[in-house]
Image (cartoon, grey):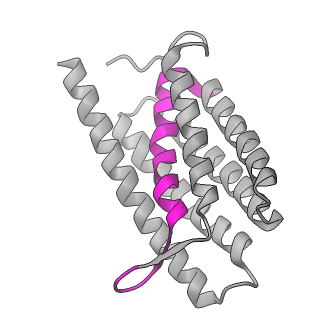
């Protein structure tokens, strides 16, 4: 199986994936302070439902456009989301928390993914998500809600966010892997 990135960043697939990546983060940020109580334990941010797609999209960008395309996607998402936050009067603590969590989480994920580039796609995705999902969830929640929510509420948010991100990312990764196998057959 060929894992080489598409030539040039003007290829349609990397551009589409970059746009979807930035849009997913935008939708997540616009809904980050709306919560769904889980039946047993946890407060799930509606934004997490959108953000969970980010992990698989980034891995697909990596595969379709290479490391440079991933860095462009991260930068594009940061610019788009900062501009949208300014227009929608999003509190600065949400902007800062989102910016820092995206930057740290995405760069950590990319570093792990890149280090495992010779391994199978599944290994790269699972290992990179194992680092970035908890890092992003913990960092964002603490920065965004410290002082406004109790430690118990933040723990419930972190728990629910990590659980939802893993489940949604796994479902998306399974579908992407299945589609890739079908296309190769």
**Residue 116 in sight here:** no
Height in image: 144 above or below 117?
A: below
Q: Judge whether 121 appears above or below 44 on screen.
A: above
Q: Residue 151: x percent and y percent?
A: 63, 88
- Residue 34 is a magenta residue: no
Please state which of residues 36 and 18 is positioned toward the viewer in this rendering.
36
Q: Residue at x 58, y 62 (%)?
A: 31
Q: Is residue 47 left or right of residue 83?
A: left
Quarter-of-image position of residue 79: top right
* Residue that lies at the very extreme toward the left in this rendered image: 185
Name the one closer to the observer, 48 or 33: 33
Q: Nearer the viewer, residue 39 or 134?
A: 39
User: As drawn, is 104 to the left or to the right of 52?
Assistant: right
Q: Position of residue 140 (x, y in %)?
A: 66, 65
Image quadrant containing the C terminus: top left
Does the segment drawn in magenta span residue 63?
A: yes
Query: Residue 83's x, y, as percent?
Result: 78, 45
Say which residue appears at 70% left-offset and 77% top-offset: 145
Which residues fall within the magenta stretch?
A: 38-67
The quadrant of the image that shows the N terminus is top left
Say how many tags the image has: 0
């Amino acid at each position: 199986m060929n894992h080489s990135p598409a030539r040039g960043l003007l290829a349609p697939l990397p551009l589409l994936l970059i746009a979807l990546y930035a849009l997913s983060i935008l939708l997540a940020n616009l809904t980050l302070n709306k919560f769904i109580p889980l039946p047993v334990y946890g407060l799930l941010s509606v934004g997490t439902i959108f953000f969970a797609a980010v992990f698989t999209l980034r891995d697909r960008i990596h595969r379709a456009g290479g490391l440079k395309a991933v860095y462009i996607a991260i930068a594009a998402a940061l610019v788009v989301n900062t501009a949208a936050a300014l227009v929608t009067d999003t509190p600065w603590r949400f902007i800062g928390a989102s910016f820092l969590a995206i930057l740290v989480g995405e760069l950590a994920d990319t570093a792990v993914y890149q280090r495992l580039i010779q391994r199978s796609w599944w290994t790269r995705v699972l290992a990179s998500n194992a680092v970035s999902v908890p890092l992003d969830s913990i960092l964002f929640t603490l920065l965004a809600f410290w002082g406004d929510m109790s430690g118990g509420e933040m723990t419930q948010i972190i728990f629910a966010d990590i659980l939802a991100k893993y489940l949604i990312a796994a479902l998306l990764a399974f579908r992407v892997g299945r589609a890739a196998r079908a296309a190769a057959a």
